[in-house]
């Protein structure tokens, strides 16, 4: 055993009487990128909150199941202990501290981490996101949406995580900026950090990930190698926006979006 990565087993979550996750199991093997696809309300953010133990801030509770990182139980830990154990969460909606400077946002991300490691962590994020070095003394709220997303990711990286949980990092960004974020996620992964990526942009997510899970109304309904899911009719129709059945002819292309004229 040991070195098995992040393992979620039979996890169920409720917000009061609302059951948001039902016996969800998944794995993020060490060094991999795994994606979770699902429609609005499927439970994607809930899953990440349950792993990072931030569920209680949203009024939710884990009712059964377990979460482990390399055979260490994470469920039961306080959120800051989960970070210390090596799991950092970039929540939905890039919640940077908008009145604080970029530098202070990054400093906040390294709180609780090892002090001696900070200069190295800062050098790494400045290399990944040079704009954050240039804007170090600017208030975070003045950054563009894409730059704020970079800051949110960078802040999480300041804790030097083994696993990064990313909740819809490309949401609301122009295609070029979304692609930049995707490139950075790949680079972060190549530097040795595992990534659990939740994305609305299924095409982008399936290109980045090695494995994918589909979540529907709180349950995993499909999982497998990302390339296989990208080629499956159901995923293509429901998450890649492929309109025609015969579009499966170009199944080697992940982005198979077919535009049809809107008739009023
Ligand atoms: N704080 C909350 N209190 C009560 N119910 C909630 C809360 N947050 C989420 N839910 C419910 O739990 C279910 C899963 O929500 P969740 O936000 O995890 O979905 P999601 O897949 O992240 O959706 P989206 O794509 O819109 O971000 C939904 O039915 C939602 O209404
Ligand atoms: Mg969400």
Image (cartoon, helix red, strand yellow):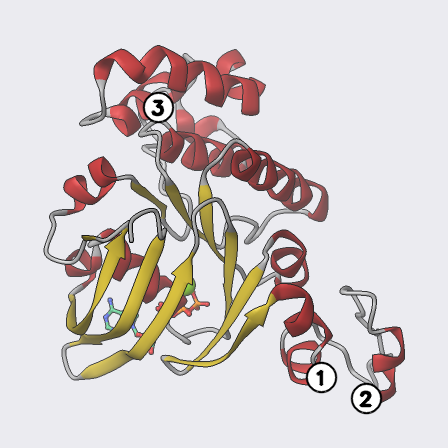
Which percent across, then down, holds residue 43?
37, 72
**Within the image, what quadrant is residue 12 found in?**
bottom left
**Are discs 2 and 1 less than 8 Å apart at CB?**
yes
Give the number of the disc on residue 233. Answer: 1
Say which quarter of the image contains residue 56. bottom left
The residue at label 3 has a CB less than 8 Å from ligand 2 = no
Q: Tell me where residue 37 appears, x and y as whole percent.
A: 52, 69
Q: Which mark is residue 245?
A: 2
Q: Is residue 36 above or below residue 249?
A: above
For mark 3, give the secondary structure. Answer: helix
Q: Residue 261, how many percent across, how many down?
A: 87, 79
Counting residues from the start of the chain, the first of labels 1 and 3 encountered is: 3
* 219 or 72, nearer to the observer: 72
Spatial separation of the CA atoms under disc 1 and disc 3: 42 Å
Q: Residue at x 40, y 21 (%)?
A: 102
Of the 4 image quadrants, the one containing the C terminus is: bottom right
Figure quarter occupied by ligand 2: bottom left
Horizontal side of residue 159 vs 13, given as left or right? right
- Badge 2 marks a residue whose secondary structure is helix
* Residue under label 3: 106
- Please name the residue shown 76% across and 65% down the image: 254
């Amino acid at each position: 055993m040991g070195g098995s990565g992040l393992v979620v087993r039979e996890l169920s979550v409720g917000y009061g009487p609302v059951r948001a996750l039902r016996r969800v199991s998944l794995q993020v093997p060490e060094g991999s990128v795994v994606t979770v696809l699902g429609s609005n309300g499927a439970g994607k953010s809930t899953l990440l909150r349950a792993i990072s133990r931030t569920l209680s801030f949203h009024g939710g509770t884990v009712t059964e199941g377990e979460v482990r990182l390399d055979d260490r139980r994470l469920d039961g830990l306080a959120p800051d202990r989960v970070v210390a154990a090596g799991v950092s969460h970039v929540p939905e909606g890039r919640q940077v501290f908008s009145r604080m400077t970029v530098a202070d946002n990054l400093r906040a991300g390294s709180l609780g981490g090892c002090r001696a490691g900070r200069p190295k962590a800062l050098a790494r994020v400045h290399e990944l996101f040079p704009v954050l070095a240039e804007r170090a003394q600017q208030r975070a709220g003045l950054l563009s949406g894409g730059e704020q997303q970079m800051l949110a990711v960078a802040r999480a990286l300041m804790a030097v995580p083994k696993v990064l949980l990313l909740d819809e990092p490309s949401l609301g960004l122009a295609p070029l900026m979304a692609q930049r974020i995707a490139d950075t996620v790949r680079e972060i992964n190549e530097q040795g950090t595992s990534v659990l990526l939740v994305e609305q942009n299924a095409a982008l997510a399936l290109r980045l990930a090695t494995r994918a899970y589909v979540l529907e109304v709180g349950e995993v309904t499909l999982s497998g190698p990302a390339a296989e899911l990208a080629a499956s009719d159901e995923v293509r129709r429901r998450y890649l926006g492929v309109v025609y059945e015969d579009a499966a002819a170009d199944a080697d292309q992940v982005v198979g979006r077919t535009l049809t004229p809107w008739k009023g």
